[in-house]
């Protein structure tokens, strides 16, 4: 039996990160135990369901035995623990590490000496040192003696058809050489991509935060350009496409009605707050967050201007909101800008008809057609395939007079040619 085959892995947190990792480990010869506070997740896993609806897992799940853990004591036999719980921010955008702390305490209560503990949740530099390590020391474990702590930030991109837990390169950091080697051996045994050892656990924590802050500031950059170019009558999307013909030193990002999801709009705050403790103000990150957080209101104001052109105001005007989730072709609502747009439109007493094929529970209508029939204006808040492929002529057929394309995903010229008022974000 290879070394890994008699090792037992316990994954704490069976969401879009932990569940795929559990499946992968089980197909790679590990005995896998899955722990989550959500009983529904556990029972669905026991039934062999693909609880994150990622297509690439469909063929792996039948080969993956995951022992769900309801009694935390059962995890005592495990050699490797992976913590993959949420790291959100609260309503004031302060980091919420309560899930990481609680998961670490659960492991510390139920861990045999010598185990490896890996945190995959996205955290800022210092969290493993200031929050995770003390929990294990308080439980009587000595770092580098009978507990090894590592950080390997998750890089899951929900819905990505190419990159997933089996093939995304990773970075790993630890407090000590042995912990680093144990973590490298683990990830190299399950992932067919580069696993880069970092010089410290702090570097590993900083890597993911930097990756996602990079994305947030670049999106803020094009969102700000969208506003200024709009005033100049320049189509920013075409300009970005033009800039993207440069084969080096340019990476296109796209303006939109806002930045949602569990990562991009959240992670920069972890770095902002950490730096604040050290009396450093991450001005640039803060301004980028302000710009991106302001995009839902900017989009609603575009709709207001367009309605004024047909002598309508929001009050008692029927508005179709197409899309509620934060990203194309998935039903994830976390930090979705569409929810902010809906809130702003309700404040302005518009009559809303909402449709998202991936979020039936938030939809007031069952089809695009039904939604358009009841509406004078449309706001596109998610760029689902169903909306992108919807024939422009049909908007005319259903009497739509105004379209605000929050994802710049419709055919602007076709819509304008039909005599419909079209406004995109920066176009
Ligand atoms: N967005 C823009 N303009 C862009 C790109 C995205 O407005 O140019 C918006 C999207 O509409 C969405 C939000 O930003 O509302 C986030 O989009 P995202 O494509 O970054 O999707 P996420 O939230 O699933 O981000 C994940 C992240 N993965 C991890 O944190 C492990 C992120 O690091 C990836 O870069 C991203 O997927 C990806 O590349 O798709």
Image (spheres, rainbow, N blue to C red):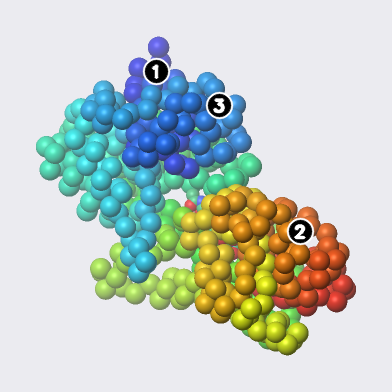
Q: Is 36 located above or below residue 8 in the figure?
A: below
| Residue nearest the observer in this picture, 137 or 173 | 137
User: Which quarter of the figure has residue 427?
Assistant: bottom right
> Where is mark 1, residue-wise?
5
As drawn, the label of residue 357 is none
| Residue nearest the observer in this picture, 113 or 387 | 387
Residue 25 x, y percent position in the rendering: 44, 28
Nearer mark to the viewer, of 3 and 2: 2
* Quadrant in which the N terminus is drawn: top left
User: Label 2 crowding class (10 Å Cα cut-off): few <14, some 14-19, many 20+?
Assistant: some
Residue 151 x, y percent position in the rendering: 34, 44
Seen at 87% across and 72% down, the residue is 418
SS type, badge 1: helix
User: Label 3 crowding class (10 Å Cα cut-off): few <14, some 14-19, many 20+?
Assistant: some
Label 2 with label 1: CB-CB less than 8 Å: no
SS type, badge 2: helix
Seen at 44% across and 26% down, the residue is 46
Residue 320 x, y percent position in the rendering: 68, 67
Seen at 55% across and 47% down, the residue is 158
Seen at 44% across and 41% down, the residue is 15
> Where is mark 2, residue-wise?
369
Q: From the viewer's perspective, tell me whether residue 39 is left or right of residue 415.
A: left
Label 1 with label 3: CB-CB less than 8 Å: no
User: Which quarter of the figure has residue 69?
Assistant: top left
> Where is mark 3, residue-wise?
60
Q: Is 144 located above or below residue 1 in the figure?
A: below
Residue 337 in sight in this render: no
Label 3 with label 2: CB-CB less than 8 Å: no
């Amino acid at each position: 039996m290879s070394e890994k085959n008699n090792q037992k892995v316990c994954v704490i947190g069976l969401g879009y990160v932990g569940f795929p990792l559990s499946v992968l480990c089980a197909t790679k010869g590990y005995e896998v135990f899955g722990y989550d506070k959500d009983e529904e997740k556990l029972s669905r896993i026991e039934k062999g369901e693909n609880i994150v609806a990622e297509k690439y897992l469909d063929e792996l799940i039948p080969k993956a035995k995951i022992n769900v853990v309801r009694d935390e004591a059962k995890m005592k036999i495990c050699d490797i623990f992976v913590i993959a719980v949420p790291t959100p921010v609260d309503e004031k955008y302060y980091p919420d590490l309560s899930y990481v702390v609680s998961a670490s305490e659960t492991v510390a209560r139920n861990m045999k000496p010598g185990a490896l503990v890996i945190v995959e949740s996205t955290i800022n530099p210092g969290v493993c040192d200031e929050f995770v390590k003390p929990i294990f020391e308080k439980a009587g474990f000595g770092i580098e003696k009978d507990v090894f702590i590592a950080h390997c930030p998750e890089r899951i991109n929900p819905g990505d058809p190419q990159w997933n837990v089996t093939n995304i390169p990773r970075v790993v950091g630890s407090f000590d050489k042995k912990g680093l080697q144990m973590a490298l051996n683990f990830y190299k045994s399950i992932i067919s991509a580069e696993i880069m050892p970092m010089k410290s656990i702090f570097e590993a924590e900083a890597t993911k935060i930097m990756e996602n802050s990079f994305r947030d500031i670049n999106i803020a950059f094009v969102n700000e350009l969208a506003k200024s170019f709009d005033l100049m009558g320049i189509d920013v999307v075409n300009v970005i496409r033009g800039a993207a013909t440069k084969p080096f030193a340019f990476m296109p990002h796209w303006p939109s009605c806002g930045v949602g999801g569990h990562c991009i709009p959240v992670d920069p705050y972890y770095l902002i707050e950490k730096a604040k403790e050290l009396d450093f103000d991450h001005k640039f990150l803060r301004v980028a967050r302000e710009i991106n957080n302001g995009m839902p209101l900017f989009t609603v104001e575009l709709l207001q201007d367009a309605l004024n052109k047909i002598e309508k105001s929001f009050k008692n005007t029927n508005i179709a909101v197409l899309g509620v989730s934060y990203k194309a072709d998935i039903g994830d609502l976390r930090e979705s800008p569409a929810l902010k747009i809906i809130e702003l439109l309700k404040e302005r007493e518009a009559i809303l008809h909402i449709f998202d094929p991936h979020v039936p529970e938030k939809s007031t209508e069952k089809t695009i057609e039904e939604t358009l029939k009841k509406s004078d204006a449309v706001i596109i808040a998610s760029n689902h395939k169903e909306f992108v492929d919807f024939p422009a002529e049909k908007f005319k057929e259903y009497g739509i007079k105004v379209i605000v394309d929050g994802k710049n995903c419709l055919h602007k010229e076709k819509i304008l040619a039909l005599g419909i008022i079209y406004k995109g974000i920066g176009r």
